[in-house]
């Protein structure tokens, strides 16, 4: 640029010397003081300040000129205020030069986009001030996490697996740990120091991990200050979340157990289930497993469990319904995985059984009918009764009713029926003996209730009459 300066001075000299018949006007741009300046292209406004023009300035007109390092004219601020309003960040990475020019009317080439080497007329250029526009700093991108820890459980909570993606630029670097409001809690200088930090003692809340690249002179970068108040030349990465949560509590499931006939074409939906206690955990779901813990379904809500899960198509077997409360992401919480292999921060409730059974078959009662004389003091007991066919059902009982179906007795076995039931004291009338095979729990299977009102999964045999007559 010294060559440019000398050539422009020579041009001004030739112009004034070749007009001997006219009064010679000597121009003098003075001397620029201030700078040099170094800025980083980081999206923040970069303005010069403290520039002054010293010496004796001579010329009808004056301006500042901003050029690139090839003398291409980028700007023509008219005065110091206009010069200080120029944002050099917009120019990108490179070098700018600031000049002061004094000139007479008729100057040619003093235009944006032209080259200062091509100026023609009576003018004088000052020295130049350099404005360096450097790239960076660049913090890159943090990879890893997010992390979720149980706060205050005494187990050290250390992050791991964090990496920096990209090509960070900057003389200095550090990690920053802040709260969720940006308050600086720590400044681990290296990844090793960051991974050695124990988040367990910080209590319930949320932390953010950042990475910073910066140049000397950073202000406000201190523990207790807010990261948003840092001033200087720096670049912050994205943040990684560290959640410090309370231990989840799933509460207790009430309702059921349930027993359904599998494959009969009737939808088998559970109902009346409730979650009791005081569950804790920001996320929740129900889980349906087989009796070996294999995850068959994960209905997110009770409504979804009761409305959308039809156990009829699952075939004969047993399912278990659980409730889970958890934080963060769980490993192994997927269809086909084992509930016992779930890893993460969670709590499971008790389980409710859903038995899917074949339709019971009661078979056929043989024997009788029986006729007894009541009130004669002779025990009236049935004998010779047998159950034929191929009864199915895990539970069974005999039932004695009156002729209106009211349950008078429920002898569990044939031996109990024949040995313990004495019809002599029942008075004149008719009794009916039935055989029942059933699954699960039955509603209405009680003394004094109507056999016709029994609800559940069961089958009744034919009945045998027992007539009780007067002497």
Image (spheres, rainbow, N blue to C red):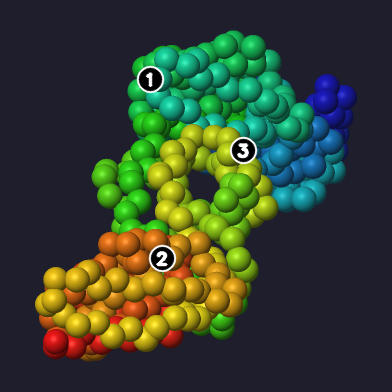
Task: Kindly report which numbered mark, 1 or 2, lies closer to the viewer in this rendering.
Answer: 2
Please name the residue shown 66% across and 26% down the image.
162
Task: Kindly report which numbered mark, 3 or 2, lies closer to the viewer in this rendering.
Answer: 2
Labelled disc at residue 359 = none
Q: Quadrant of the C terminus?
A: bottom left
What crowding class fits label 2: few (fewer than 14 Cα within 10 Å), some (14-19), or many (20 or more)?
some
* Between 17 and 64, the one nearer to me in the picture: 64
Task: Kindly report which numbered mark, 3 or 1, lies closer to the viewer in this rendering.
Answer: 3
* Between 11 and 356, the one nearer to me in the picture: 356
Can you say whether 391 is above or below 350 in the image? below
> Residue 430: x percent and y percent?
23, 87
Circle nearer the N terminus (3, 1): 1
Q: CA distance from mark 3 to mark 2?
A: 47 Å
Q: Are marks 3 and 1 in contact (CB under 8 Å)?
A: no
Residue under label 1: 152
Q: Secondary structure at mark 3?
A: helix
Residue under label 3: 341
Residue under label 2: 414
Q: Quadrant of the N terminus?
A: top right
Q: In this image, 428 relative to 308: left or right?
A: left
* Between 117 and 260, the one nearer to me in the picture: 260
* Between 68 and 226, the one nearer to me in the picture: 226
Q: Secondary structure at mark 1?
A: loop
């Amino acid at each position: 640029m010294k060559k440019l300066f000398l050539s422009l001075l020579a041009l001004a000299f030739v112009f004034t010397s070749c007009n001997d018949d006219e009064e010679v006007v000597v121009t003098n741009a003075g001397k620029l003081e201030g700078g040099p300046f170094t800025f980083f292209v980081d999206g923040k406004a970069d303005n010069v300040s403290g520039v002054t023009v010293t010496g004796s300035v001579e010329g009808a007109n004056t301006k500042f000129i901003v050029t690139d390092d090839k003398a291409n004219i980028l700007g023509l601020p008219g005065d110091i205020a206009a010069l200080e309003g120029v944002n050099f960040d917009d120019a990108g990475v490179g070098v700018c030069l600031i000049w002061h020019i004094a000139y007479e009317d008729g100057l040619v080439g003093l235009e944006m986009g032209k080259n200062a080497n091509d100026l023609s007329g009576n003018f004088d250029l000052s020295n130049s001030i350099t404005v360096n526009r450097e790239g960076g700093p660049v913090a890159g991108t943090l990879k890893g996490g997010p992390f979720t820890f149980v706060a205050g459980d005494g187990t050290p909570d250390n992050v791991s697996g964090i990496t920096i993606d990209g090509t960070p630029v900057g003389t200095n670097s550090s990690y920053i740990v802040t709260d969720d409001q940006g308050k600086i809690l720590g400044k681990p200088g290296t990844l090793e120091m960051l991974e050695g930090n124990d988040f367990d003692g910080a209590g319930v809340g949320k932390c953010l991990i950042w990475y910073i690249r910066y140049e000397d002179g950073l202000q406000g970068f201190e523990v207790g200050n807010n990261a948003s108040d840092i001033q200087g030349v720096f670049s912050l990465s994205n943040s990684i979340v560290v959640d410090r949560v309370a231990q989840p509590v799933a509460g207790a499931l009430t309702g059921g157990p349930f027993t359904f006939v599998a494959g009969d074409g009737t939808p088998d939906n559970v109902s009346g289930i409730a979650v009791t206690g005081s569950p804790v955990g920001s996320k929740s779901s129900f889980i349906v497993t087989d009796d070996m813990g294999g995850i068959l379904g994960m209905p997110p809500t009770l409504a979804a469990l009761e409305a959308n899960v039809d156990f009829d198509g699952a075939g004969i077997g047993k399912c278990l319904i659980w409730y889970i409360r958890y934080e963060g992401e769980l490993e192994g919480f997927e269809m086909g995985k084992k509930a016992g292999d779930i890893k993460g921060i969670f709590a499971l409730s008790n389980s409710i059984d859903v038995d899917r059974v074949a339709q019971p078959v009661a078979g056929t009662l043989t024997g009788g009918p029986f006729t007894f004389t009541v009130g004669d003091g002779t025990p009236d007991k049935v004998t010779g009764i047998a159950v034929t066919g191929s009864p199915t059902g895990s539970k069974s009982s005999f039932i004695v009713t009156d002729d209106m179906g009211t349950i008078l007795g429920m002898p569990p076995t044939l031996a109990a029926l024949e040995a313990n039931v004495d019809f002599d004291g029942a008075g004149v009338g008719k009794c009916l003996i039935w055989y029942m095979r059933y699954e699960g729990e039955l509603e209405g299977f009680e003394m004094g209730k109507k056999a016709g009102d029994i609800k559940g999964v069961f089958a009744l045999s034919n009945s045998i009459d027992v007539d009780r007559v007067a002497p």
